Amino acid sequence: MNVLGIYGSPRKGGNTDRLLDSVLEGAQAAGAEVKRIYVRKLKMSGCIECGGCDKTGECVVKDDMQEVYPMLAEASVIFLASPIFFYGITAQAKALVDRSQAMWARRMLLKTREERKRYDGGTGYLVAAGATKGKTLFDGARMEARYFFDALDMHCGEGFFARGLEKRSDLEKHPELLEDAFRFGREAVEAERTGGSPAAAG
């Protein structure tokens, strides 16, 4: 099974990176083949809304996203990880999400209205970390992730959410989160095999 981890944080080695590392280690422990995308390393623009993908399902902008599209298409499970910036995902992650418009266009071209009522591409999960304890802290990011995975023809599973993480060292105070993240990644792969779903965390 192909699993893709998308690192959406601009900060290398921060709390979100480490949580996704643990999630992917859990996925590997369940027997998955794991690939990683570090969005902060991509040289890419946001969507320019040119409509070039409408007739072909292919993005006409030639940048690093051209290497990302096949990875999105091949994965059975995707983990999109981002810290929360202003109650949403980071600008870097959002640019990748916006460029998935080409994947949405492809889905519209290849599937009938009736066929689009089901998802055939697997399951996507949001992994998010935020500093505050606000009740709606993750709501904006959840909505963005839902429609990202919809564009990829994937179910949107319950995600993994960690509160109270702001400074790089904050995760050291909560080692149980890394254990929970490992378990979440393992269960996500097992659930994809059996048709179940891992328990949401956070």
Image (cartoon, grey):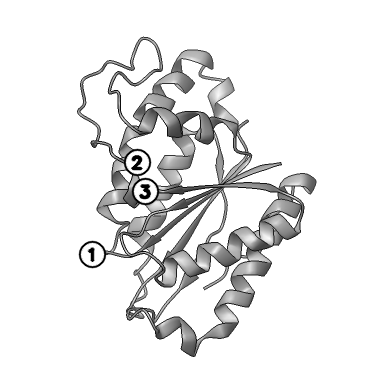
Q: Residue at x 48, y 22 (%)?
A: 107
Residue 107 visible in the displayed image? yes
Mark 3 residue crowding within 10 angstroms, few (<14) / some (14–19) / many (20+): many
The correct choice, above or below, for 54 with respect to 34 in the image is above
Among the 4 quarters of the image, the one containing residue 132: bottom left
Q: Secondary structure at mark 2?
A: helix
Residue at the extreme top: 55
Disc 3 marks which residue?
Answer: 39
Residue at the extreme right: 194
Name the amino acid, label 2.
Leu
Query: Closer to the observer: label 3 or label 2?
Result: 3
Q: Residue at x 40, y 21 (%)?
A: 105
Q: Secondary structure at mark 3?
A: helix
Name the amino acid, label 3.
Val
How far is disc 3 from disc 2 in space, using C-alphas?
Answer: 8 Å
The correct choice, above or below, for 16 with respect to 103 in the image is below
Label annotation for residue 86:
1
Mark 1 residue crowding within 10 angstroms, few (<14) / some (14–19) / many (20+): few
Name the amino acid, label 1.
Phe
Disc 2 marks which residue?
Answer: 96
Give yes or no for contact between labels 3 and 2 (Cβ–Cβ under 8 Å). yes
Dot placed on the residue nearer the N-terminal end, 1 or 3: 3
Residue 198 visible in the displayed image? no
Label annotation for residue 103:
none
Of 123 and 38, the residue lying toward us = 38
Residue at the extreme bottom: 173
Percent position of residue 199, x then y: 65, 65
Dot placed on the residue nearer the N-terminal end, 3 or 2: 3
Query: Closer to the observer: label 2 or label 1?
Result: 2
Percent position of residue 85, x then y: 26, 64
Q: Secondary structure at mark 1?
A: loop
